[in-house]
Amino acid sequence: MKKVILLATLFLGINGVFGQMNEKELLKKTEEVMATIKDEKPNGWVKKGVFTFLANEATFNNWLAGGQSSISGNIGVNYDFNYKSNTWTWDNKLIAGYGLTKIKYQD
């Protein structure tokens, strides 16, 4: 019974503290966020991205159940090229990957 009373008190207390915004406050907050978004992106080209290289080696020596030793490498590219002017924006994304594997005793 004590747990139920405690939970009810917490629930009512949270609802009283976190009231809803009225329409004017919500509109003001939305306008502030929109102004911040407009100011964040400068005009012209913005280029950013990530180039990754991953290498892996697996060696199995004296393994009774079998297995094959191998070496592999992967390259990944993930870039954004975006243009913004006062009248329009152009967003480009380049995602590419390439990988090779060499297994021991195979051409």
Image: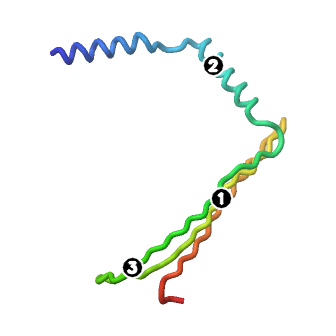
Place of residue 88 in the rendered image (x, y in percent of width and height, measured from the top left) = 81, 40
Q: Quadrant of residue 11?
A: top left
Asked if the residue under mark 1 is in contact with the one under mark 2, i.e. CB atoms within 8 Å, the reply is no
Drawn side of residue 7 relative to residue 18, left or right: left
Q: CA distance from mark 2 to mark 3?
A: 61 Å
Mark sitting earlier along the chain (3/1): 1
Place of residue 61 in the rendered image (x, y in percent of width and height, measured from the top left) = 37, 81
Q: Which mark is residue 51?
A: 1
Drawn side of residue 37 relative to residue 1, left or right: right
Circle 2 or circle 3, nearest the eye:
3
Residue at left 65%, top 60%?
77
Residue at left 77%, top 45%?
46
Q: Is residue 13 above or below residue 67?
A: above
According to the picture, the residue beneath numbered tag 2 turns out to be 29
Q: Nearer the viewer, residue 71 or 86?
A: 71
Q: Is residue 72 above or below residue 54?
A: below
Circle 3 or circle 1, nearest the eye:
3
Q: CA distance from mark 2 to mark 1?
A: 38 Å
Going by the numbered disc 2, the residue's amino acid type is Lys
Circle 2 or circle 1, nearest the eye:
1
Q: Secondary structure at mark 1?
A: strand
Going by the numbered disc 1, the residue's amino acid type is Phe
